């Protein structure tokens, strides 16, 4: 009874108050297909490597990645660059270290254990260089930018295990630079984006077709199209990994736990049967007065 009324109350609440969070400010991002969605989803290594390339060649001049260390790029479940590749990559960066014996800070080449250095010395400098808005760190962006899907989706999502709101938003944002509708005034330093809440974003459209040169096949053609849509997809997958580097391990563990529980439930069923067999298999019978004949 209590369960039933709680459920009804929950549904009524949901019906009454479910307005998508940015319904007034933007259009809900369309759902995309991702290799990492669903209970068995995994990251596509090649896609993560391309996404990292896009981050490095385009986004890194403005956005930091402070919770990602170079060595993370080699660990299982991620882009899985080789240890040698990661060493070479880290060495291309200058990292501030110190103080040394004379008390001075100094710069040295990066090592795999170092974290990505921020492109700006501090937030004020970042804001000053970008028209007053500091570009946010991208490490956990795929988790930070999510949106409410409202009723009935949040119920359906429990069953379909939909959890890619962040990735869908980021993809929509990257591909959402369109001409402003007539009558909409875009202030100086602002850019119109169909999916950014409020539509006016300080980030200029970072991507354009052909901007990043992807690895080539034996015939000299890029492995995937060098288009804004593909770049956005790849860099979004990369951000999804950066925000949740242990996604694959988590899903694998979840599967193992479910498999264990199913086997355990079957064992318990037979155990119960065996334990209660002495009273005719019926637990209720134990409480009834014994019949002596
Ligand atoms: C020229 C500098 C610049 C470049 C290059 C750049 N960004 Fe940005 N980005 C910004 C600024 C500035 C903001 C803050 C926008 C605002 O607050 O209006 C921002 C905001 C964002 C946001 C947050 C949006 C939100 O919902 O708040 C994301 C995500 C993002 N950028 C992703 C990227 C990605 C991915 C790339 C590379 C493909 C990239 N950016 C390249 C300057 C840049």
Image (cartoon, helix red, strand yellow):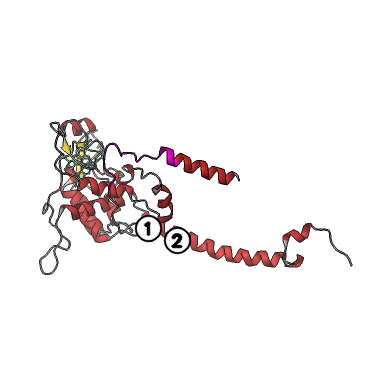
Q: Is the residue marked by circle 2 packed among few (<14), some (14-19), or many (20+) residues within 10 Å? A: some
Pinpoint residue 222: horizontal percent, then vertical percent.
Answer: 13, 62
Q: Secondary structure at mark 1?
A: loop
Residue under circle 2?
A: 255
**Quadrant position of ligand 1:** top left
- In the rendered structure, which disc, 1 or 2, sits on the residue that comes first in sequence? 1
Instruction: Identify the residue at image location x=43%, y=38%.
Output: 16
Residue 239, numbered label: none
Ligand 1 contact, mark 1 (Cβ < 8 Å)? no
Q: Nearer the viewer, residue 220 or 169?
A: 169
- Residue on which the image places disc 1: 38
Residue at x 19% of width, y 34% of height: 126
Quadrant in which residue 25 is drawn: top left
* Horizontal side, residue 101 vs residue 38: left or right: left
In the image, which residues are magenta? Answer: 14-29
Residue 166, percent from left and from top:
31, 47
Q: Residue at x 30, y 50 (%)?
A: 240
Does the magenta run of residues contain 169?
A: no
């Amino acid at each position: 009874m209590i369960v039933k009324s709680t459920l009804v109350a929950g549904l009524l609440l949901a019906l009454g108050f479910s307005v998508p969070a940015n319904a007034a400010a933007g259009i809900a991002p369309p759902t995309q297909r991702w290799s990492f969605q669903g209970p068995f989803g995994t990251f596509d290594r090649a896609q993560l490597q391309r996404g990292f390339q896009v981050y490095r060649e385009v986004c890194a001049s403005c956005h930091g990645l402070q919770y990602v260390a170079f060595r993370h790029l080699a660990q299982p479940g991620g882009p899985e660059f080789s240890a040698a590749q990661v060493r070479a990559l880290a060495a291309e960066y200058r990292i501030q270290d110190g103080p040394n014996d004379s008390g001075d800070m100094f710069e040295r080449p990066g090592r795999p254990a170092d974290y990505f250095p921020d492109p700006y010395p501090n937030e004020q400098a970042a804001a000053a260089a970008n028209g007053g808005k500091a570009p946010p760190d991208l490490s956990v962006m795929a988790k930070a930018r999510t949106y409410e899907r409202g009723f009935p989706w949040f119920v359906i999502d429990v069953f379909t295990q939909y959890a890619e709101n962040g990735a869908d938003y980021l993809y929509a944002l990257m591909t959402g630079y369109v001409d402003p509708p007539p009558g909409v005034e875009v202030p100086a330093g602002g850019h119109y984006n169909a999916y950014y809440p409020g539509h006016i974003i300080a980030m200029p459209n970072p991507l354009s077709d052909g901007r990043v040169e992807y690895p080539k096949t034996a015939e000299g053609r890029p492995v995937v199209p060098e288009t804004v849509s593909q770049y956005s997809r790849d860099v979004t997958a990369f951000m999804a990994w950066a925000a949740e580097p242990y996604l694959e391990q988590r899903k694998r563990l979840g599967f193992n736990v479910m498999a264990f529980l199913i086997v355990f439930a079957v064992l318990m069923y037979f155990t119960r049967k065996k334990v209660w067999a002495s009273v005719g298999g019926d637990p209720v019978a134990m409480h009834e007065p014994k019949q002596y004949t």
